[in-house]
Structure formats: C-alpha cells, structure tokens
Image (spheres, rainbow, N blue to C red):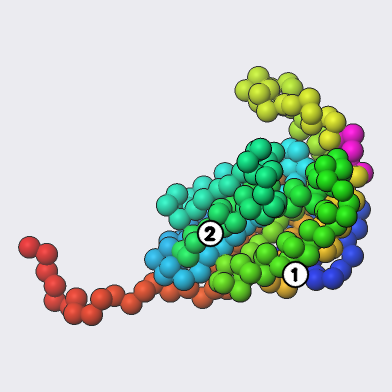
Amino acid sequence: MDRYRIAPNSHVDLSRHDPNDIAEFDGDKDEAKSLFAEMVERIAELQYVMWAENKHSLLVVIQAMDTGGKDSTIRSVFSGVNPQGVRVANFKAPTSVELEHDYLWRIHPHTPGKGEIAVFNRSHYEDVLIVRVLSLVPEERWSKRYGHINDFERLLTDEGTTVVKLYLHISKEEQAERLQERLDTPHKLWKFNKGDLEHRALWGDYMEAFEVMLSKTSTADAPWYVIPANRKWYRNYVIGRIIVDTLESLDMKFPDPEEGLDGVVIS
C-alpha cells in the first residue's frame, strides 16, 4: 500500500492520483470483497489484543469531499470490532463554546487512550480546508495551522499513539452520481443538503486546499494516504490492508497471566 502513502515534504498533485485506480489488486471484485471480510476479522482480533495489552493506541483520521464515503468506510472497516475499544468522533461546524477556544481545543479530548482506536470523521483538518476555502478566518491565521497540526500529531505519536490519515479521493463526476442517487432514493433523501451544491461549485478550490494539506502535513510518523475511492469495494480493500498492516506492525501481545494459576479449578 506504499503507493498510496504521501512521502514527507513531497508536492501533491491530485490530478496525478486516479480515483478509479485498482492497481494493487489483480483479482476480481468478489475476491477483493472476500479478502476484505478476512481483514475485518483480523482488525477485530488485533483490536482485542490492543485492548488487553493497554499499551498502544491508534488514531484514524478520515477526510473527503461530500459523498466521499467517510461514513460507509467506518461502517465497513470497523464492523467487527468490540465497541468498548473503538470510538468515532464526528466533527461538524464548531459550537459557540468551541469557537471561544483555539481550534484544537475540541479535538484533543477525542484522541484515543491506551488500548483504544479512535476514528475521526472529519477532523482538525477542517481548519485548513473549509476555513481556507470559505475564508472563515484570515490567511494569516489558517496558514500557520499546518505547523500547529504537525506539532499536535507529533505530541500524540511521541506519547504512544499511532496516527494514520486517509484522504478518500473521488472524482467530481463520481460525486455528481452520488448526489443524484441521494435525490433519487427515498431513504437517502435526508442526506441531501442544498449546501453541498455550494461546496461542489468550489471543487477546484477544495482540491487545491487538499493538495496543500497533503503536502504540508504528511509526516513520517503521521502519514497521509490518498485512497482511490470511486470504487467502494477497492476503497475498502485498500483501507483494510493499511489498518491491518499498521496494527500488525505494533507487535502487540496479550499480557502475561497472573502467576500461580496452574492447577486452579473452579468449583
């Protein structure tokens, strides 16, 4: 999966990343789905060891354009895990109380504790994306935030949290199809927001903001992955592989049992 990982200090041009790419899989879709099901089971096993060992933690950050697949990715990839050890945080528009503080104030309490996995559905990166595109704060302020974010994530990694960041890359044409599907499907109509069309009209500005974000904040310890996300089955396959590889790299083990248990019989 290294082909999707953004190297530190590299210039990102999203036009060179194909959202239809399936280059890392040479089988058919059904085979990929079968392998993904095995990955889901493996993630659940590894999360159980993480919970028991109570030493490591994992933060998964997910960013995308509207309809990019953030919700369905979370449902699919983490469908088998024990809810005790996984928390999902959704970061929508900040409240009036949150706006009274610095922009990272609302983020830190949702980072994972030892033994936990935390998944951010949107994140602190909104403050260099929508804030930038809609000019919600002056450039003098948001331009400094890339450095703040790198320092914040360095703090997390220094204290034992592994950070994986996923940008779900869809095409503008794919977004049009997904928005239309929401309009045409009664049980999905609630998800359609006219404001999505206003953001869609700024597609080029958002792509530029994502490119700068990926270029400035993909680090050795907290890398970004650009995930081809037009095909949902391949998106899941790639992300499942990344999460499994990341968890396995932690070399986690169950704690040693209490001494003196040999011969204990429950009467």
Residue range highlighted in magenta: 200-204
Amino acid type of the residue that numbered disc 2 sits on in the rendered structure? Pro
Q: Which of marks 2 and 1 is nearer the N terminus?
A: 2
Q: Pointer 2: residues within 10 angstroms few (<14), some, or many (20+)?
A: many
Amino acid type of the residue that numbered disc 1 sits on in the rendered structure? Thr
In the picture, measured across the screen, residue 148 lies left or right of residue 267, that is right
Magenta span: chief secondary structure: helix
In the picture, measured across the screen, residue 172 lies left or right of residue 29, that is right
Vertical side of 59 occupied by 209: above or below: above
Q: Mark 2 points at which residue?
A: 112
Q: Are marks 2 and 1 in contact (CB under 8 Å)?
A: no
Q: In which quarter of the image is residue 5?
A: bottom right
Q: Could you say which is closer to the camera, residue 232 or residue 222?
A: 222
Of helix, strand and loop, which one carries label 2? loop
Vertical side of 261 occupied by 65: above or below: above
In the picture, measured across the screen, residue 155 lies left or right of residue 68, that is left
Q: Quadrant of residue 237?
A: bottom right
Rendered-image quadrant of the N terminus:
bottom right
Q: Residue at x 85, y 57 (%)?
A: 143
